[in-house]
Image (spheres, rainbow, N blue to C red):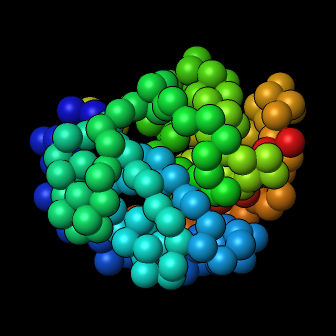
Amino acid sequence: MNYYDKHADTYINSTVSVDMSSQYSLFLPYLPKGASILDAGCGSGRDSLYFLEQGYKVEAFDNSSSMVEHARALTGLAVRKLSFAELDYDSTFDGIWACASLLHVPRVELGFVFGLLHRALKPKGLLYCSFKDREADFSQGGRDFSCFTSDSFKLFLSDLTVFELIELKYSQDVREGRGNERWLNILLARK
């Protein structure tokens, strides 16, 4: 997460005001009022703040010290600094929000991490995650990206057997200069 520690201000400025209503509408309608949400890889805390403002109970973590510091200041939450591989929750959350964060988990670790996310969810809990819609993983600017297409994610999911696919939809990146990037937005339910 060295990249995000070095470039925190630039990243936050480019993402903190992004309109996420389309992604929120894929996730929040399925949750009960006042549900508990884990913002997994919370970055600036933008989404945690929105969830708090909507009346949800929120916990958050990120693996970048700079992002944790910013998210704490923005939300007032006790944001934890940890990686996905260090998740230690057990049947705690109604929903997990992993927006543009799991794509930084190395592909060889994704199965293990999805197992930890499954364990962190209450029975029938929901997991929202998003990945760049690409055939192959790649590295760019000091960051590694694990990517999926719709078909490759469904294949990955069939190997896991612990989640049911609720919805999968595409969206365009809405950040300035990124309109050619497509995202895969995925909603899963714990089996």
Of 2 and 149, the residue lying toward us:
2
Left or right? Give the position of 175 relative to 99.
Answer: left
Question: Residue lying farthest top?
Answer: 108
Above-or-below relation of 45 to 93: below
Above-or-below relation of 186 to 18: above
Figure quadrant of residue 33: bottom right
Please state the horizontal and vertical placement of residue 25, each as a whole percent of the image: 65, 77
Of 32 and 146, the residue lying toward us:
32
Please state the horizontal and vertical placement of residue 102, each as a whole percent of the image: 52, 40
Figure quadrant of residue 128: bottom right
Looking at the rendered image, the quarter that the C terminus falls into is top right
Please state the horizontal and vertical placement of residue 144, each as a whole percent of the image: 40, 32
Q: Residue at x 67, y 57 (%)?
A: 94
Q: Residue at x 51, y 30 (%)?
A: 88
Q: Residue at x 83, y 58 (%)?
A: 166
Above-or-below relation of 23 to 43: below
Q: Residue at x 18, y 63 (%)?
A: 73
Q: Is residue 50 visible?
A: yes
Of 70 and 20, the residue lying toward us:
70
Left or right? Give the position of 150 relative to 146.
Answer: right
Looking at the rendered image, the quarter that the N terminus falls into is top left
Please state the horizontal and vertical placement of residue 45, each as a whole percent of the image: 33, 62
Total numbered labels placed on residues in the image: 0
Left or right? Give the position of 150 relative to 183.
Answer: right
Q: Is residue 128 visible?
A: no
Above-or-below relation of 32 to 113: below
